[in-house]
Image (tube, rainbow, N blue to C red):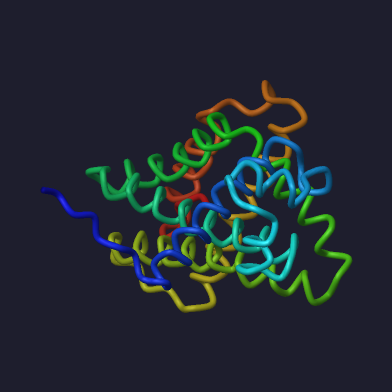
Amino acid sequence: MTTTKRLTRDEQRARTRARLIASARTVFARRGYHRASLEDISEEAGYSTGAIYSNFDGKEDLFLAVLERHVADRVEAVHRAVAAASTPAERVRAAADDWMRFLREDPDWYPLFIEFWAYAVRDPQLRDQVAERFRVILDNNAGLVRARAEELGVPVTDEVVAMGGLYVTALADGLALIKLLDPGAVPDEFLADAMSGLAAVRPGVGDAG
């Protein structure tokens, strides 16, 4: 006879929270931040709205949790792509290609992020919370820039590494904005080509976020 382990209260709460975050991401992406309601999200998750308020302070707090989960997933995906490549040059292209593939395969996310970004920048407290989560992307790209420099035996300062991470992130996000308006204007290989050229001229720079 097979027995099912009973979840502890903390385990059950963690499972509920994870399910709410996943459902919120689906609904936010489908309807947009402002059009999505907590009722929509709770229905998607199969819970009452009370479950949302038991785990989050409200709609903004729930979206911040979605953003935090998204950032963690993106960082993990980039590291997987880089780890699967064999050479420094291939690692540069793998990271860039992963970003363009994400934009292609999950087209609803970036418009959602821009919608919330525009909303958040008008609220200093919320803006800081979004910036804190987005900084993980900047730090991750800076770390990959440092790894690229170390592979090439190029000494770099912390300031150069940070600026490299900022440069790459800005390029990747700028291309995403253009691709939103005019998908055909940005070939899928453009970012990889740009980062490969940059890495060849200025060793130490080479990843997307």
Where is residue 78 drawn, in percent x and y? 41, 50
Q: Position of residue 103 (x, y in %)?
A: 58, 35
Which residue occupies the foreground of this view, 75 or 205? 75
- Is the residue 156 above or below the residue 115 in the image? below
Residue extending farthest to the right is 122
Residue in view at x 51 percent, y 41 percent: 99
Q: Is residue 39 left or right of residue 200?
A: right
Left/right placement of residue 185 relative to residue 83 reads right
Badge count: 0
Residue occupying the point 49% across, 36% down: 193
* Residue occupying the point 40% across, 61% down: 144
The outermost residue toward the top is: 184
Classify residue 58 as left or right of residue 208. right
Residue 140: percent from the left, percent from the top? 46, 64
Identified at 14% across, 49% down, the residue is 2
Q: Position of residue 21 (x, y in %)?
A: 57, 54
Taking the image as shown, residue 134 lies to the left or right of residue 182, namely left
